[in-house]
Image (cartoon, rainbow, N blue to C red):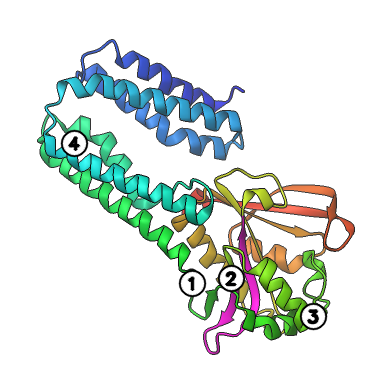
Amino acid sequence: MINAANILTGLRIVFSFALLFYPALSPVFCVLYTAAGITDMIDGTVAEKTNTESVFGARFDTAADFIFVIVCLFKLIPILNIPVWIYLWIMVIAVIKVFNIVLGIIIRKKIVAVHSVMNKITGLLLFLLPLTLSFINLSYSAAVVCATATFAAIQEGHFYQNRESKMIIKTERLILRPWDESDAESLYKYAKKPEVGPIAGWPVHTSVENSLDIIKNVLSKEENYAVCLKEDNAAIGSIGLIPPAQSHTEIKDTELEIGFWIGKPFWGNGYIPEAVRALQKHAFEDLGCTALWCGYYDGNVKSKRCQEKCGFVYHHTEENKPCALMGDIRTEHFTRITKEEWLK
């Protein structure tokens, strides 16, 4: 698959192999090294902007990164007089990282990469380190990189522990908290209205017991939140992040889908856009999400407007789509917002 993003990734491989033919830290080496780094920074953005993201592109990018790192280690380690304390510090960081991976597997049931701001700063500092060796002592620059990497690793562990203890998100007017069985009556009060569930693709709740069963088997899952007013903390709606395996459309492993609804008495107050923006921040900053998707069925104008208010952009439409919970066939429209678009 040939496109601009893949060409940039390919250039990184070319630049990486070219590094082998020049002395480490020579002017030509530094130019090639910088060029390879720049392609790494922009190829993903180019793929998103040109709508040419693909599984092949992601794997090609990973392969290019691996080649670049191996070549740099091969060229730079022999000429660097690295103190023993730096190696020991790196080992400590590695132990923390391994612990975080194990913790992530235990809590999330899979390996999760946290793309935090501190991790990105660590990567940038590590990339810049070789270019600063001519005017900054290695011990000083390595200490800064190691300190940043240590903080980032500890932050990852804190992230996983937060997930274990059930995150509560607060906004100006709302509390987004995990559902509790005691919310069954409140859930039934709003979910029994025919104007709420069917247009979103789920049937009205028939009793408090029905709502309790849904809390136990559906809403209690990870990343589902009751939308509550700060004044009484009573559930008036729901919002949640849907993993790729359960998404209504095909999305990448690094992306999530968001779903939401709110009781009819609270329509028109801007509560759901406020909740969506809070969950966008959580998804992009805490979960390392690269894009958020959202969908709405034909006729659900309120959901469409909410998505537009929150920066989601129309992506595609899927017709003749079975709606399993309602037992009918529908047309569903999908919108998306990438992390880069959210940051603007």
Classify residue 254 as left or right of residue 187.
Answer: left
State if disc 1 and disc 3 touch (CB < 8 Å): no
State if disc 2 and disc 1 touch (CB < 8 Å): yes
Classify residue 77 as left or right of residue 227.
Answer: left
Q: Amino acid at mark 4?
A: Tyr
Alpha carbon separation for disc pair 1 and 4 = 39 Å
Q: Nearer the viewer, mark 1 or mark 4?
A: 4
Q: Amino acid at mark 2?
A: Tyr
Q: Is disc 2 surrounded by few (<14), some (14 to 19) or many (20+) residues within 10 Å?
A: many
Q: Residue at x 45, y 58 (%)?
A: 286
> What kind of element bears circle 2?
strand
Alpha carbon separation for disc pair 2 and 3 = 19 Å
Q: Which residue is mark 3?
A: 192
| Picture coordinates of residue 114, whole percent (x, y) | 43, 50
| Residue 42 visible in image | yes
Of the residues under marks 2 and 3, which one precedes in the sequence? 3
Q: Which residue is mark 1?
A: 169
